[in-house]
Amino acid sequence: MGSRKVVTLNEFIIQSQKGFPFATGELSGLLLDICLAAKIVNREVNKAGLVDILGLTGDANVHGEDVKKLDVFAHEVFIDALSKSGACGGIASEESEGFISVNDAGKYVVCIDPLDGSSNIDVNVSIGTIFSILRRKTENGPCEMKDFLQKGCEQVAAGYVIYGSSTMLVYTTGVRVNGFTLDPSIGEFCLSHRDIKMPKQGKIYSINECYRSKFPSWVNDFVDYCKEDDPSTGRPFSSRYIGSMVADFHRNLIKGGVFMYPDMTTHPNGKLRVLYECNPMSFIIEIAGGQSLNHEGKRILDIQPKKLHQRTPVFMGSLELMDTMKTFTSQMVDAK
């Protein structure tokens, strides 16, 4: 058997850059800076039970949620890495009320959820990092709000890191979705999932059913459909919900399924944030062949955000399963 050449993330990015003759390398460098920060966070996640970084700080973030110690650490690591990147002009973090302007000459801004699923930190369940990269609207000087408040379709790159049984980075620059698994023996992310394609039909539905009484009726009707016995369509489907968006999304991306975080009577605008969570994940899922919509059937990537921490209901998944879901309500129209 011949040996298979290992392709590191660094090598892959450099090779990909050669396909764009006018590329300056700044975006590539920015992606590698994010990669380095992810390695540092991964190191701390792996030894979290051995040091004093678990548990609550006693503070709350801008959303009124309790802040975990590892949340703060991840936030600081990514801010530090991105601040030192000459390509990054500003950062909007889920953990900060406003954006941070870091480099007047930087051509890009980054929107980031440094540690998604932090409620799972203390119980050793997969958590992650989600990031979105946008080209600045302003050319020079400190960043402005309009640099961040762009539609998701304007992203130049997006990705996530999942810290689980293995640590994996998945990203796209709008052409293909590729996954890289961290090899701890050499400290490098290595290409493990080339050109990821989401199955057109899925048999997994992911939703927090404890909020059933607060969901729109059509959502409950669709969930009931997923539970019905029908061998011809492969039902009942499997219910899988972890409570960490990165983990739920990653499983469904690979195996096929639908992830839902609807509007609720208590949260009419949903709970997930457009810039830090929904836009980057929607960008990935569309490039991989899936679909992502809000509660009105509008493409998530076409939403014009009006504030940094704006929320939206979101439904994303395999193309055929999403088409089935849209038949359950007149609101979920074709968003082409």
Image (tube, grey):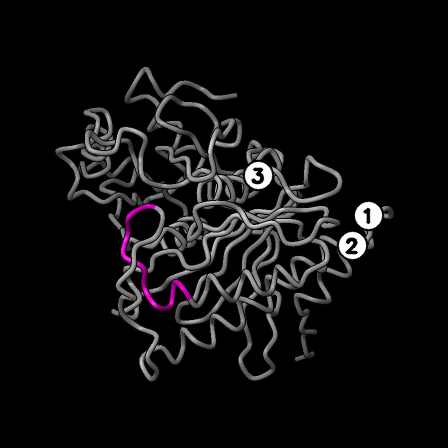
Above or below, 232 against 280 in this view is above
Q: Observer-nearest residue: 173 or 28?
A: 28
Is 36 a magenta residue?
no
> In this figure, which residue is indicated by the disc labeled 3?
148
Q: Which residue: 62% across, 46% down?
A: 109
Specify the amino acid type for callout 3. Answer: Phe
Above or below — where is 7 with respect to 265?
Answer: below
Residue bearing the label numbered 2: 17
**Where is residue 269 shown, x and y percent of the image?**
32, 30
Query: For the residues marked 1 and 2, what is the alpha-carbon distance in whole angstroms?
Result: 6 Å
Indicate which label's residue lies in the foreground, 1 or 3: 3
The amino acid beneath tag 2 is Gln
The residue furthest front is 141
Residue 11 sits in which quadrant? bottom right
Q: Residues within 10 Å of mark 1 (few under 14, many from 20)?
A: few
Q: Which residue is mark 1?
A: 20
Q: Nearer the viewer, residue 219 or 75?
A: 75
State the SS at label 2. Answer: helix
Residue under the image location 75 percent in, 49 percent down:
105
Mark 3 residue element: helix
Which stretch appears magenta? 63-72
